[in-house]
Image: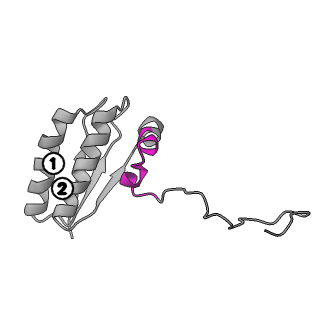
Amino acid sequence: MTITRLALPGPGPTAQDAARLCARLALLYEAGAAGVVCDARAVTAPGLGAVEVLARLRLTARGYGRGLAVTGAAPALRALLDLTGLVELLGEAEEREPPPGVQEGIEPGDLPV
């Protein structure tokens, strides 16, 4: 099983980079890569272009029936993906509020709901 690395350009990929990176990802899968790890370490000044690149890469990977792991995301990129609701692109579970009526912990003196 071959895992291949695809590096994002820095300091901030743009929407114009998306087509080139998606074509590269498609070639990697067609050449037999079982999985691809997208390295985001160079992305030090992310903008909405970086979000678009990652979203389009994820869609390309899904088109080949594969997932895409993203590593090396700096706090600024994580925050931007969180703000746009796309933090799942990093492969991490999204933190959500518990459903109404669900109590996470019981404190002494809490009244029953």
Q: Is residue 19 above or below residue 93?
A: above
Q: Secondary structure at mark 2?
A: helix
Residue at the spot 20% in from the left edge and 65% down from the top edge: 2
Crowding at dot 2, Cα within 10 Å, few <14 / some 14-19 / many 20+, comes out as: many
Quadrant for residue 1, please give it: bottom left
Dominant secondary structure of the residues highlighted in magenta in the image: helix
**Relative image position of residue 73 (x, y in whole percent):** 40, 43
Give the left or right position of residue 99, taking residue 85 as reference.
Answer: right
- Left or right, 46 with respect to 14, comes to right
Quarter-wise, where is residue 3 in the image? bottom left
Residue 3 seen in this snapshot:
no
From what the image shows, is residue 103 above or below residue 19?
below
Is 45 situated above or below 21?
A: above
Q: x, y percentage for residue 109?
A: 91, 63
Q: Amino acid at mark 2?
A: Thr
Q: Which mark is residue 60?
A: 2
Q: Secondary structure at mark 1?
A: helix
Find disc 1 in the rendering and name its residue: 22
Outermost residue, right direction?
109
The boundaries of the magenta stretch are: 80-92
Residue 99 or residue 83, whichever sits in front: 99
